[in-house]
Amino acid sequence: SDSILYFTANTVQGMQPAFFILLLLLFYVVFSIFIQSSSGMAVLTMPIIGALAILVNIPGREIVNSYMYGMCLMSFLAPTGLILPSLAMVNISLKTWFKFIMPLLIICYIIAFLDRVNIGYAQLQMKQTLPWSAEVYALGAGIFFIGYFLFEVPSNLMLEKIGARATLLRI
C-alpha cells in the first residue's frame, strides 16, 4: 500500500484544487457502490484522502462535502435497503425510478460541483481582501444550509400527512 499511496501523492501534488474535488466526488460515487455504510466509508477513506487533501491545500470541510455528496448521490441509485422497499411501497419499478432520478442527479452533481468550487475560490479571494476570520467565513457558508432546513422539514411533515406516494417527487 505504500507504493499506491506514494504514486497517488505524487499524482495529486501539483493538481488544481477544483479538479481534485471533482475527482474526489467521483471517487466517492464509485466507492459507494461497494461500501454502503457511511461510517465504514469514512473510517476506510478519510485518513488517506485527508492526507492527500493536505498536499493539494484543500480544507477538510471540502473533503467532507465531497464525501457527503458522493455518498448521497449514490444512495439514490444503489438498490439496497432504502430504495427497493420504498419503490415497492409505491409500486414503481426500478427502471422507472432510474429514468426519473438520473436527470435530477446529473443536475444536482453539476450544481454541487459548481457550488463547492465557487465557495472554495471565494474563500481564497476573501482571505486576501477582507479581514474575515475562518469562523466568519464558516458562518457565511453555513447560511447556505438554511434553505435545506426551511424546505426539508416541512416536506417531511407533509410526508407524514399525505403519504409517500404524493411526496416521493420532492426528492
Image (cartoon, rainbow, N blue to C red):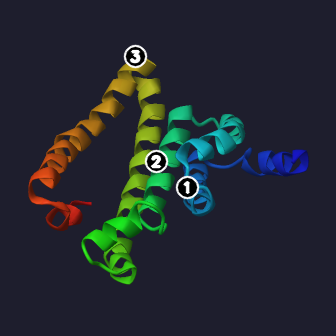
Report, in whole angstroms, how far the alpha carbon at label 3 lies from the one at label 2: 21 Å
Residue 61 locus on image (x, y percent) = 50, 34
Residue 39 locus on image (x, y percent) = 56, 41
Report, in whole angstroms, how far the alpha carbon at label 1 lies from the one at label 2: 26 Å
Quarter of the image that includes the C terminus = bottom left
Q: Is residue 168 left or right of residue 119?
A: left
Q: Residue at x 38, y 77 (%)?
A: 98
Q: Which residue, given by chain and number where applicable, does mark 3 sit on?
A: 131
Q: Amino acid at mark 1?
A: Gln
Q: Residue at x 32, y 73 (%)?
A: 88
Mark closer to the observer (3, 2):
2
Q: Which residue, given by chain and number where applicable, does mark 1 sit on?
A: 36
Q: Amino acid at mark 2?
A: Val
Q: Does residue 139 lie above or below 103 as drawn?
A: above
Q: Earlier in the sequence, mark 1 or mark 2?
A: 1
Q: Earlier in the sequence, mark 3 or mark 2?
A: 2
Report, in whole angstroms, how far the alpha carbon at label 1 lies from the one at label 3: 42 Å
Q: Amino acid at mark 3?
A: Pro
Q: Does residue 147 lie above or below 105 as drawn?
A: above
Which secondary structure, mark 2? helix
Residue 51 in sight in this render: yes
Q: Does residue 94 lie above or below 61 as drawn?
A: below
Which secondary structure, mark 1? loop
Residue 49 in sight in this render: no
Residue 135 locus on image (x, y percent) = 40, 19
Within-10-Å neighbours for mark 1: few <14, some 14–19, many 20+ = some
Residue 66 locus on image (x, y percent) = 51, 47
Which secondary structure, mark 3? loop
Within-10-Å neighbours for mark 3: few <14, some 14–19, many 20+ = few
Q: Which residue, given by chain and number where applicable, does mark 2 sit on?
A: 117
Mark sitting on residue 48: none
